[in-house]
Amino acid sequence: MNSVLSDLGSRIRDIRMQRNLSISTLASRTGIAKSYISCIERNLKSNPSVDVLERLCTALGVELSALIGPGLERMEPDWIQLAHKAQQSGISKDEFLDFIRRHGL
C-alpha cells in the first residue's frame, strides 16, 4: 500500500480526536456511515473517494493536504486532477496501471 494512503486513517483519527469528535458525531456531520469511517481509520478501507475525503475535510475543518500528507502535496495539480478524473470515470487502479504499462509510460 502507498505510504500516503497507509497513514490516511491514522491522520483522520488523530484530527478527529484532537477536535474531541466521536465517530458518531463525524458520521452525522458528513453523512458517511460510522462503520465506513471506522474502517478508514483502521486502514481497512484505504482508498476512499474524493467525495468522502472532501466531506471529512469539511467536517474536520482541515485542508485535504492535512489528510493526504506531503506525498501528494508535491504532485503537480494537473496530475492530481487526472487521477481524480480517472477515478470518477469508473476506471479501476488496475486498469489505469495497465494502460500506463501498455503505453510504456
Image: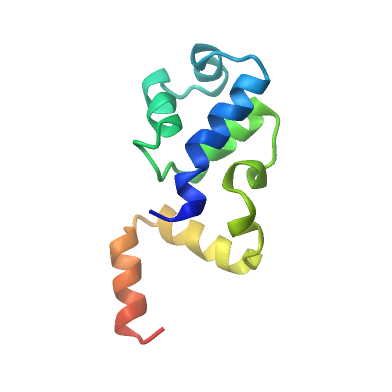
Q: Can you say whether 30 is above or below 70 in the image?
A: above
Instruction: Give residue 21's position: percent from left, percent from top.
Output: 60, 15
Horizontal and vertical percent position of residue 91: 34, 60
Query: At 51% from the left edge and 34% from the top edge, which residue is drawn?
Result: 10
The answer to which of 37 and 89 lies nearer the viewer is 37
On screen, residue 90 versus residue 88, left or right, reads: left
Which residue is at 70% across, 29% downward? 61
Residue at the image position 38 percent from the left and 53 percent from the top: 1
Picture coordinates of residue 75 (x, y %)? 62, 65
Which quadrant holds residue 19? top right
- Indicate the colouring scheme: rainbow
Count of numbered circles in the view: 0
Vertical comparison of 72 with 29: above or below: below
Up-down: is 30 above or below 80?
Answer: above
Q: Quadrant of the C terminus?
A: bottom left
Q: Position of residue 70 (x, y in %)?
A: 64, 54
Left or right relative to 49: residue 20: right
Residue at image x 43%, y 53%?
A: 88
In the figure, is residue 52 to the left or right of 47? right
Residue 18 placement: quadrant: top right
The image shows residue 34, relative to residue 36, as above or below, that is above
